[in-house]
Amino acid sequence: MSGTLTILGMPILSLLIFLPLVGTALVLMIPSSKPGAVRGTAFLVSVLTFVLSIPLITMLDGARSGMQFVERKEWVPNLGITYFLGVDGISALLIVMTTFLSAIAILSSFGSITNRVKTYYATLLALETGMIGVFAALDLVLFYVFWEAVLIPMYLIIGVWGGPRRVYAAVKFILYTVAGSLLMLVAILYLYFSFHAATGEFTFDLLRLYNTPLSHPAQLWLFSAFALAFAIKVPMFPFHTWLPDAHVEAPTAGSVILAGVLLKMGTYGFVRFAMPLFPDAAHELAPLIILLAVIGIIYGALVAMVQPDMKKLVAYSSVSHLGFVMLGLFAMNTQGLQGGVIQMVNHGLSTGALFLAVGIIYERRHTREISEFGGIAEILPWFAAFFMIICLSSLGLPGLNGFIGEFLILLGAFRVHPKVAAIAATGVILAAVYLLWMYQRVMFGPVTNEKNRGLRDLSPREFWTLAPVLLMIFWLGVYPNPFLRKLDGSVADLVARMGRTMAQVDKPGQVLPASAAGGAESTAGAAVPAAVPAAAPAEGGSR
Amino acid sequence: MKMPFGVDAPLGMIEPLLIVSVLGILLLLVDLLLPHGKKHHTAWLALAGIVYAMIRTASQWGQFQVGYSGMVVLDNLSTALNLLFLASTGVVVLLSMPFLKKEDVEPSEYYALLLFATVGMMILASGLDLITLFLGIEVLSISLYILAGYRRDSDASNEAAMKYFLLGAFASSVLLYGIALVYGATGTTSLVRIAETVSGSATMPEGLMFAGVALILVGLAFKVAAAPFHMWTPDVYDGAPTPITAFLSAGPKAAAFAALIRTFFIGFGPIQAEWNTILAVIAALTMTIGNIAAIAQTRVKRMLAYSSIAHSGYVLIGIVAGGAAGGAAAVFYLFAYVAMNLGAFAVVVLLEYKGERGEELRDYAGIGFRYPVIGALLSLFMISLSGIPPTAGFVGKLYLFGAAVQSGHVLLAVIGVLNSAISIFYYLRLMVLMYMREEQETLPAIRVPWTLAICLLIAAVATLGPGLWPSAWIDAAREGMRALFS
């Protein structure tokens, strides 16, 4: 493991985790009568956190396996709990995405949140601490602490600043999540004692626990407990019913964070915990999970198509998109995993931006009904252009970010289950249908509703809220390699770990169908990762 | 083994007990001397005495001694629990001061009774004999019966006291009957010698013994409010003066658990296999009934009453898990539970106005933004009660469920976590009310008496501290169990 990068004497990961919490304290100290100062402080803290998180990507050695920027301190020595942080390419990308989207979410709230301003920004910053902690923790109890710590702030954001049915949505959100994660807690404890039984040592250190010998039924039970917790969070069909409620009722920033980051906590949980801890069970149950993923892709898309409410449409599109991520992860080969991870980031950007766009319309008209709109492209030309790009990115147009992820995922899935990949691919078409159809009904045609006549175009603040997201959408679409290269080492680790029981599927010599893109876009070539260096030895991840 | 009384009566080992007893008597006398309207000052004397007793108790940490013909033991478990009892009594005294003033109740023997109840708890925690156990329970219970009915002008308070007294007396007699049967089976009331007899002799009449164990279990289950012997809890908790409700839910419950741990781990330890399953069923029932019934409550104190039943169920998991790990987990959880529960009750006392206001859940609407600090503190206690990190409640549950998994009771741990999920619903409902509903009428500005502020501070520190840095607390809990398993 590499040494720890320190900034101003603080190890970088601890700094990133606790800086937003310091921001919470700062915000709480400002008198409520100065909402401007509250907004400014919150935004500055979030931007500073984002800037300080950039070295996580730039200084990360993507080719290396194992964890980097590691920090380890005793926390509860008598139970074997350590304050153990570290990132690999996967978590580094997700952390930077988190700090990025948090800053955007805070900026986007300036106009829409007018009551209890101070508490709102304090809560949002506390939420950021929890989210970064989830992606950085390598001790199972520490992870669980952050995982749960995210719940309360999100609960408050939905429940206090949400829409008319906000309390119902907030309670549903927290009960669903907690029911799953508490079962995971029992599984964590079982794992802990199994490791103790095998080695005589009490530890919650994830990297050590990777090597816990477990009986076959125990693996299946434990995997199921972890998978349930994460599947609810993702959310996978049929555990998705909390998501539309939460999204519809949450304020815009809440939706951005929820879709952008919180759902990724679920998929990340699979990559970091459920799959590598219980590889046999993961292989055995992969067909079931892939089935649910594909059902999610198609079902989410079909339900999205018939939604009269824009925000609900975007919410169901998340179910569909996250189905793609799960499909990629459980293809369990390099392309699938790399695609799955990069698609997590893409979905965070695209869907975050979609929610921002819907929020911008909502602030003007206080409705999200598609039928209330029509032809507003001519009234809001800037918004129309931005919204178009976001929709295209979300539906996976080559040249924009969504394409890279979905392409890699389908490539990975095709190598394992060609028929499943073919069915899943229709999800891409359906995405085009529901997004473009919505866009057409909202933006094109004659202006049918007189109320839409006087709408103003993007304000400078709104412009600068969306512009950085669009920049990233283009960057990841045109030149994703810098990001993909950061994933090489960690994905190879994972493939090696999963491959210990399934070497026959991932033949290293197999030539990738690099021309599968059909030359549709020259930039697409860059998307296909070079053959990943031969998988690191199985132990690679643990040292 | 038997020694003449004079030799085997080391006063030093029961010093805290003596201090509190003398203090109680002293309070009764001082109360007589004070003129009307000044009787409130006895509280200060009580507090000073409690602090002194705590200092003396703390100095006993690490000592081990058995005395009084093997009837009383001083070990780290009794020392730790004595500290817990004294601290919780101290907090309740602080809570009572503004409460009694607000309700216009003369304190007279109120504080003395609190101290006598504490004496009962201390006897329970250090009893090594079924007779000592019974003595402790009676001293504790009789004081509590009076305290529950302390508001003589209130029907609810009278009803609470009467119910508590009738059912409590019944439970005590069941307990005594059990003790008699066990004595009949083993020929002794000493826990140590019961264990020797049970594991040593083949001639022990098993039926008599098991009937005795079952009756003792029923009696103690009543005292800790475990299902199906929990029925008295909601009515008594609801009717009693709020500081007494807080008191009831904290110290006496912990004391009854201490008795349960000593009796079943030491005395009935050799036949653990026989009672373990029954206790596991009781634990599961207690958690489930407590949590499900709590959902349906509309009054704060009733909700907290059912919540305290549910928490008894969690602690029972530790006793079912058994061994040093299970016992330490149970003790740790008792500490966490007392801290967060007293904190919650301190807020209830604070928000209760004279008359009926502040007793219904809906009276909490909107207070989160109206009184930000109080709202934040109550949220902290609710979060801890529901077992969400980073609080003592979470570490306690982690430890308890860990002990259950380690001892092979995975199903019980699963029932426990599902119950935690249920409990989150009603604990967070208070947060929903506080933060997500508008206040019904403009709430008056509130002045927090400084004694209450101290209570809240102590409770908050004791809830958050072991949540963030649990090591020292876990070590202490383990130390407490060491003497039992050496």
Image: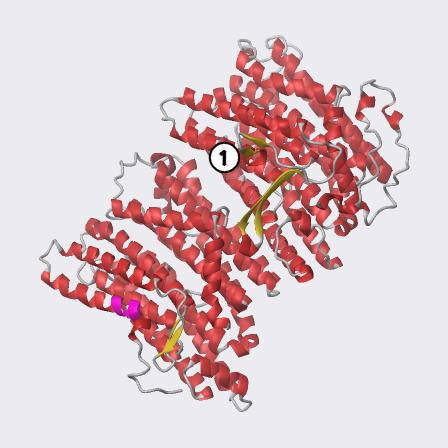
Compared across the picture, whether A76 is left or right of B57 comes to right
Above or below, A446 against B174 in this view is: above
Instruction: Name the residue nearer the viewer: A52 or B327.
Output: A52
Amino acid on which the number 1 mark rests in the picture? Ala
Left or right for B468, reference B444? right
Residue B218 placement: quadrant: bottom left
Residue B179 position, x and y percent, is: 41, 81
Secondary structure under badge 1?
helix
Please name whichever residue, A100 or A183, is drawn nearer the observer in this view of the structure.
A100
Q: Is residue A97 above or below residue A332?
A: above
Quadrant of image for the N terminus of chain A: top right
- Point out the image quarter for the C terminus of chain A: top right
**Residue sitting at x 55%, y 42%:** A146
Q: Is residue B297 visible?
A: yes
Q: Which residue appears at 35% of the width and 77% of the height?
A: B132
Residue A229 is left or right of residue A215, and the answer is: left
Crowding near pointer 1: few (<14 within 10 Å), some, many (20+)?
many
Instruction: Depth check: give the residue in front, A517 or A385.
Output: A517
Q: Does the rendering let one see residue A165?
A: no
Q: Chain of mark 1?
A: A
Relative depth, front residue between A271 and A165? A271
Q: Residue at x 34, y 67 (%)?
A: B121
Q: Residue furthest bottom?
A: B203
Question: Can you tell which quarter of the image residue B2 is in?
Answer: bottom left
Coordinates of residue B424 in the picture (x, y in percent):
49, 48
Q: Which residues are magenta?
A: B15-19
- Across and down, in percent, residue A31 comes to 36, 26
Q: How many marks?
A: 1
Q: x, y percentage for residue A334?
A: 80, 36
Residue beneath label 1, please? A126
User: Within the magenta stretch, is there residue A512?
Assistant: no
